[in-house]
Image: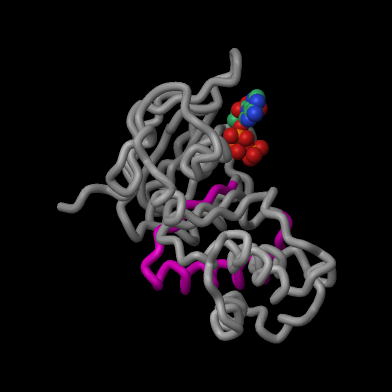
Amino acid sequence: MPNPLIEIQHLSKRYGSIWALRDITLNVEAGTRLTLLGPNGSGKTTLIRILARLSSPSSGSLKMFGSDLHTQGDEVRKQIGVVSHTSFLYPALTAVENLTFYAGMFGVSQTTETIESLLYEVGLLERQHDLVRTFSRGMQQRLAIARAILHQPTLLLFDEPYSGLDGAAVNLLQHILTNIHHEGRTIILTTHNYRSGLDFCDQAAVLVSGRLVYYGSPAHIRIAAKNPDFPETPG
Ligand code: ATP
């Protein structure tokens, strides 16, 4: 059996006296859609930030793409795309201009066709020449996805994709993420919304106060949610 894409062993992250993550052990196979669930402050963003190499663990080990965190070069970073609350888009530029700007910044070669194909993929081709400040939250999320996959990463990390979106926008976003997954990408996203989170995943991990308390298929988590000690399940 091939090695997992991501191997997390006894990983912890401390901010002073606060344990953002405690002793997390988790493997993610290539091609998996993994949802990180949990209430506010449970450690989801911290884990995404560590996977994105924006933050380092306090202890424990993390292997990605077969190499240890401490020995990974920039090659690993090139295989990761990130969408987070802080993914900045320029409101006074058009969708095309935003992608062209970021492609240049990331050193990704692009043509009009590659940019148009990305915008088509996220359902924004018809709005390509509109200013981003005229876009809804859902449209901005979709443009942020296009930006995150400009360099064709194999792993997409997405922090709180459903936040601030209505049901129709969530459905559209999940449809686009499904297509991106079918292209062979592994997707890890966070949400505190159990319903949306379990609708779009192969595996789910539930974090509470930095600890991994449940892990399994959506069906497994739905059964576990019937336990009285299961964390509160908004949505
Ligand atoms: P939310 O859904 O509210 O974003 P979360 O599950 O993503 O929550 P984290 O943001 O990872 O949780 O936070 C986990 C814990 O770590 C919280 O107690 C938070 O206050 C703390 N924390 C996170 N980042 C920092 C930081 N830079 N400095 C200090 N404490 C932090």
117 over 194 or under it: above or below: below
Does residue 102 appear left or right of residue 63 in this picture? right
User: Percent x, y for residue 128?
Assistant: 71, 81
Instruction: Report the magenta residues as a range.
Output: 164-191
Q: Residue at x 62, y 60 (%)?
A: 105
Asked if residue 188 is among those painted magenta in the image, a careful observer would answer yes
216 over 119 or under it: above or below: above
29 over 10 or under it: above or below: below
110 and 31: which is toward the camera: 110
Q: Residue at x 84, y 72 (%)?
A: 134
Task: Give the image quarter of residue 165.
Answer: bottom right
91 and 31: which is toward the camera: 91
Quarter of the render that holds ligand 1? top right
Q: Residue at x 59, y 78 (%)?
A: 115
- Residue extending farthest left: 1
Total number of numbered discs in the rendering: 0
Does residue 190 appear left or right of residue 7 in this picture? right
Q: Is residue 38 visible?
A: no
Q: Is residue 192 visible?
A: yes
Task: Give the image quarter of residue 114.
Answer: bottom right
Task: Give the image quarter of residue 117.
Answer: bottom right
Q: Residue at x 64, y 68 (%)?
A: 142
User: Percent x, y for residue 102?
Assistant: 64, 63
Asked if residue 17 is among those painted magenta in the image, a careful observer would answer no
| Colouring rule applied to residues | one colour
28 and 222: which is toward the camera: 28
User: Percent x, y for residue 99?
Assistant: 65, 70
